[in-house]
Amino acid sequence: MNITYSKYTWVCTGDCDALIEYTFKDGYGWPNGVIQLTCPCGSVCTLLSVADATIVPSTTKEGQTMETTMNNLPLSDAEKYNPDLLVTYKALKDFSDAEYITDKVRNIEYELHNSRQNAKIALQFQNKISSAKSIILDAYSDSDDQETLLNIAEALDIELTKEVEWSATIEVSGTMQVSLTDDYDFESELIENLTVETNHGDIEVNDYEVTNVREAY
C-alpha cells in the first residue's frame, strides 16, 4: 500500500541561501491558512511549493522494518534538495501589473543571491559617498580649489548644502471685524490667531512671536 506525503519547499530570504524541504505524512503537515517557517539563521523563509510525495514501502518484512525506521529519520540535504523543481512566483514591478514567472529553483536561487549581493554593494557605495560628502562639505569653504570639489560632488550626485540659523522681522497689517457693543481684547485676538508659515520646502519656521500689537488709525 502506497503512503502519500506532502512535501513543502522553502527558500531562506537571509544570507545563508538555504533551501529547506519538509515532507509530512498526510494529516501531519501545516493546516490550511498561513504557513510560516523561520530558518535556523533567524530569517523568514518564503514558501516555494507544496507537492504530493509518494513513498512506496518494500514488500519484504525486513524492507518494511527498514522503511519504518527511515521514516523516523530526518531527510538528508541531498534528499530534500531539488534544483530542477519548477516554481511559479509573482514578480512585482513599480508601475505596472505583477508578472507571474515560472522558473527552476536553481535559477531562483541565483537571482536571490545576486540580488542580496547587489544590495550589499549598493549599501557599501552609499556609505562611501556619504563619507565623501562629509569630506567635501568640511573642506569646501576654505579650499583653494572649489571647482574640483564641485566637480567631484556633481559626479557623485552630492548636493552641497549646509544648515544656517536665521531671524527676520516682519511687519504685518490687516483688518478684522470686531463688535461695537462688546469689549474685546485686540492684542489677544492677534496673538492667538496670527501665525507665520513658509511656502518653501527648504525653509523651516522653528519659532515666532507676535509683539507690538496696535490698532492703526
Image (tube, rainbow, N blue to C red):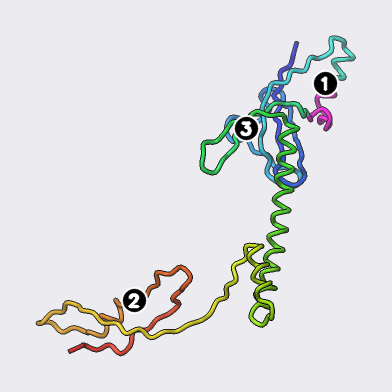
The image quarter in which residue 212 lies: bottom left
Which residue is rendered at x = 83% and y = 32% of the image? 77
Cα distance between the residues tagged 1 and 3: 36 Å
Q: Which residue position is annotated with label 3? A: 89
Per the image, is 96 magenta? no
Q: Nearer the viewer, residue 1 or 149?
A: 149
Residue identified by numbered label 1: 68
Q: In the shown orientation, is residue 188 left or right of residue 107?
A: left
Frontmost of labels 1 and 2 is 2
Magenta stretch bounds: 68-81
Q: Position of residue 72 (x, y in %)?
A: 81, 27
Question: Of helix, strand and loop, which one carries label 2?
Answer: loop
Q: Amino acid at mark 1?
A: Thr
Disc 2 marks which amino acid?
Thr
User: Residue most toward the left?
Assistant: 181
The mark nearer the N terminus, 3 or 2, is 3
Mark closer to the chain start, 1 or 3:
1
Residue highlighted by disc 2? 195
- Give me the residue at 77% from left, 39% from top: 18
Question: 10 Å neighbourhood of mark 1: few (<14), some, or many (≥20)?
Answer: few
- Seen from the viewer's position, the closer of residues 108 and 138 is 138
In whole angstroms, how far apart are the C-alphas of marks 1 and 2?
81 Å
Above or below, 117 against 201 in this view is: above
Q: Quadrant of the N terminus?
A: top right
